[in-house]
Amino acid sequence: MYLCMFRFHFRVYERLLAMTFALEEIRKDLELLPNVTLGYVIYDSCTTASAALEGIMRLITGQGKTVPNYQCRSFSSAVALIGESYSSTSIPMARLLGLYKFPQISYAATVTSLSDKNQFPSFLRTIPVDHFQSICIAHLIQYFGWKWVGLLSDGTDYGLQGSPKVKEELLKAGACIAFSETIPAVYSELKNQHISKIIQKSSANVIVIYSIDVDLYPVMELIAQNNVSGKVWVASEGWAQSYLFSKNTFLRTLQGMLGFLVRKGDISGFKEYIYSLNPYMNPDDIFLKFFWELVFDCQLQILDKTNNLTKELKTCSGDETLEGMKLDFFKLTDLRNTYNVYNAIYAVANALHDMISCRHGEGPFGNGTCAVIYDVQPWQLFHYIKNTHFKNKNGEEVFFDINGDPPAIFSIVNWQVTMEGSFKYQDVGRFDVVAADNKKLTLDVPTIVWNEGHGKIPQSLCSESCSPGYRKVAHPGQPICCFSCIMCSQGEISNESDSVACVKCLKDGWPNKRQDKCFKKVTEFLSYNETLAVELTVVSTFLEITTTAVLTIFIKWRHTPVVRANNRELSYLLLFSLMLCFLCSFIFIGHPTHVTCMLRQCAFGIIFTLSISCILAKTVVVVIAFNASKPNSNLHKYTGPRLPKSVVMLCISVQIVICVSWLIVSPPFQDENATSVTGKLIIECNEGSPAAFWFMLSYMGLLAIVSLVVAFLSRKLPDSFNEAKFITFSMLVFVSVWISFIPAYLSTQGKYMVAVEIFAIISSGAGLLLCIFTLKCYIILFRPDMNTKDYLMGKGAFKS
C-alpha cells in the first residue's frame, strides 16, 4: 500500500469499503466469476497530480517502482484502475494510461474534456459528465423563470470547462448573465474581496456556482462574514454536499441552496459489512486502524507478523464493536459517489465474465481469438469493459456510451437548516436526460425551503416582466433581459407577457382597451335597417311617385297650351330622367358589391347629365325661338325639333365617354376600409380613380352653370317664353346643392358620406321638379282658365 494521508476522510474511506465489499460479493458469486479471485492495490493520490502519476507508474511497471514503460522479468497483474475522484488529477492519469489502453473508471471526475476519446482513449466513468449537469442547471433556471443570473466558477479544469457550457445553456434557455467571475487558482484576498462585493451589489438573486468545494471555501467564507443573504445559490456537483460548509457561519447565507448531485443508490448488505469490520481480524489494514481509533477515541495494541507489540499505547479494550452505533459520518442512506464505486467494480467483474465466456473463433481479437484469462492484457479487458451492459442488484442498467459516459441522472437537493442548527440535504427533484422532454425535470416545489426573505419562489429579473399589451424594448449596450415596456401602437396587440413585438390585428379586427386581444370590428355601411336609410328611402319613394304623377298629368294634358308651350318632348324626357334620378338613390343604400359600386356613380352621372341636358336644351330653344322671331334673323333654321335632340345627345354622349373610360381604366370596386374610423370596418365603394369621379362631377357642374347663365340671360323674354325664370331658380338650387355637397362629402366617412351624396341627389332632383313643374301642374289641375293659348299669348303665363 502506498499512503500519503495527512488526515482521515470518512467519505473517502466509505468509498474504499464499497470497493472491498463489492469484491467480497463477487468472490461469493459462483456464477459471475467462478474460480477467479479479484485482488486490489490502493494508492493515495493526495489530491495532487504528481502523487497520482507516481502511483500509476508503480502500478503499471509491476515492480512498485517509478520506472515508466519498463519491465524486467516481472509484470503487473493489475488490469483496471478505479479512480480518481477529482477531474484535475484524473486528466494527467488518463493521458498516461491511455498510452497503454489501460482501462480507467472514475467514479467522480465529471469534466467534459475527458469524454474526448482521441485524448483519453481508455477513460470511462460511472458519474454523469458535466455537459449534462450544465443542461440540468439551465432547465432548473428556466423552470422557475429566473432570467437574471450570476455565474461563479473556480480556476481548475472543472470550473474552466464547465462554466462556459453552463453559460451557453443558460443563454439558450433565455436567461442573461448578470456577472461571470472566476475564483483564482492561487489564493488572492484582493480577488476574493472583489467577488464578494460584486455578489453583494448585484441585483441578481440567483447565483450559479460551478466549483469544487476546496477552491470555493475561502470566497464563500468571506461572503458569509459579510452577512449576504436573500440569494438563491445553485451548486454544481463539486460542492453540493460538501462537509466544508456545515459550520454555523454558513447557515444564514446558504440556507435554501439548490444543488445537483449524482443520483443516489442503495447497496444492500453494506451496512452489515461495515458492522463486521474489526482491526483485530485485519491487522494489515492501516486504513481500518485509523478509522477505529478515530471512532472509539482510543489507540490500538495489535501484534504484527513477528508477534511483536506495536508501539501504540494499550488504550483500546478490544471489546469495541460498530454494531448498534450511529454511523452518521458515513451517510449510508445517501450513497452517491460510493454507489458509483460499487458499479465500477461490477463493471470490471462483468467485463471479465464476458471475456471468460469468449469462444475461440468468435472472439473480438485477431483471427477471432479470445484473451487468455491467466495472461490478460489491460487493452483486452478494456474492450470488454467499454461494451459491458448489465443490471445491478437494484435493477438499474449500467453501461457506457460511445464516449465512455453513463446515462445522466441527477438528484436535486435543497439545503435546509435543522432544529439542531445544521444542514440537511433534502431531495426535492430529479433530472433524467434520457426521459421525455416534459419529464426530464421533476420537482417537488412545496418541499423547497428558500433563503430568508423569500416565503415563495424568489424572482431574479433585470427588468420587471412586460404585461400583455406591451412590448419589450432593449436597453442599448445591455443584455436582452434588461428592457423597458412600451405600449403597443394603435391597431396592434400583444397577447402574452414579455412580447418582443406587437402584432397587427386582422383587417376586420381591432384591439380592446388593454391591447391584449383583438375583437371583430363593427361592420358599417348604409343599411336599409337604419333610420337614416329608411328616411332617405321614404323621401326618394315619395319623389319618385310625385314625378310619376307629374309625368302622367303632362301626358294626359299633352295637347294643352301649357304642356305644348315649352317643348313637351323635352319635358317628358326631363321628367323621365328625374324618375331615374330618384331611383338611382336606391343603388347607394345596402351592402356595397363590385357591381353596385360600378353602377352607382356612372348611373348617377349619366342620368343627371341627361336632366341638365334637357334643361339646357329647353333654355337654348327658348333663346333661339325668341331671336328667330326678329326681322332678318338667320336663326329660324334652328327652330325645328332637331336642335334640342342634338343638344341632349351631344351633352350626354360626352358624359358616357367619360364614364366608359373610367370603367375601363380604373373602375370603382367594393372596399373594406379599416383605417378611417377607429374600431369600425367600413364597407364602401372605392372610386378607383378619384380623378375620373371629380372629372365626371365637374362636367356635370359645367353643364349646370351654362344652363344657369343662359337661363339668367333669357329671364326677361316675353311672357309666353318665360319658363327661363323657373329654370334659373332650378339651376340656382341645383348648383347650390352640389357646391355644398363637395365640402360635406369630403368631411364625412363611411355611411354618412353615402348619405350626403344621396341627399344631394334627392335635393337637386327635387329642386328641378319643384321649380320647373309645380306652377304648370297647378294651372293644369286647378286653373284651366289659364291653360289657353289666348291667355298665354295675351296676359302672360306663369305669373303668380
Image (cartoon, rainbow, N blue to C red):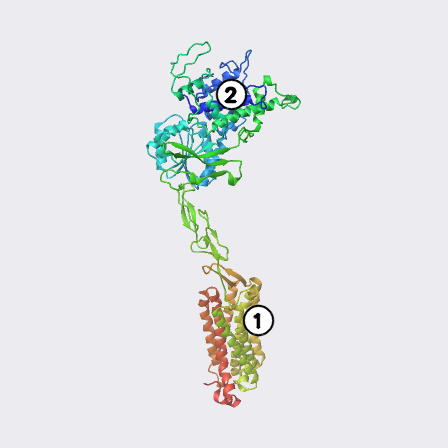
Residue 195 is drawn in which quadrant? top left
Q: Residues at badges 1 and 2 in contact (C-beta under 8 Å)?
A: no
Nearer to the camera, 616 or 52: 52
Q: With 548 as the anchor, is 249 left or right in this view?
A: left
Whether 350 is drawn above or below 511: the answer is: above
SS state under label 1: helix
Q: With 1 as the anchor, is 369 left or right in this view?
A: right
Rendered image: mark on residue 96: 2
Q: Which residue is mark 1?
A: 653
Which of disc 2 and disc 1 is earlier in sequence?
Answer: 2
Whether 774 is drawn above or below 37: the answer is: below
Nearer to the camera, 659 or 626: 659
Nearer to the camera, 456 or 688: 456
Q: Is any atom of residue 701 visible in this view?
A: no
* Three-letter code, disc 2: Leu
The answer for how far apart the CA atoms under marks 1 and 2 are is: 105 Å
Q: Where does the image place residue 515, in percent across and percent down from the top left? A: 44, 53
Count neighbours of disc 1 (C-alpha within 10 A) and say few if under 14, some if 14 to 19, many if 20 or more.
some
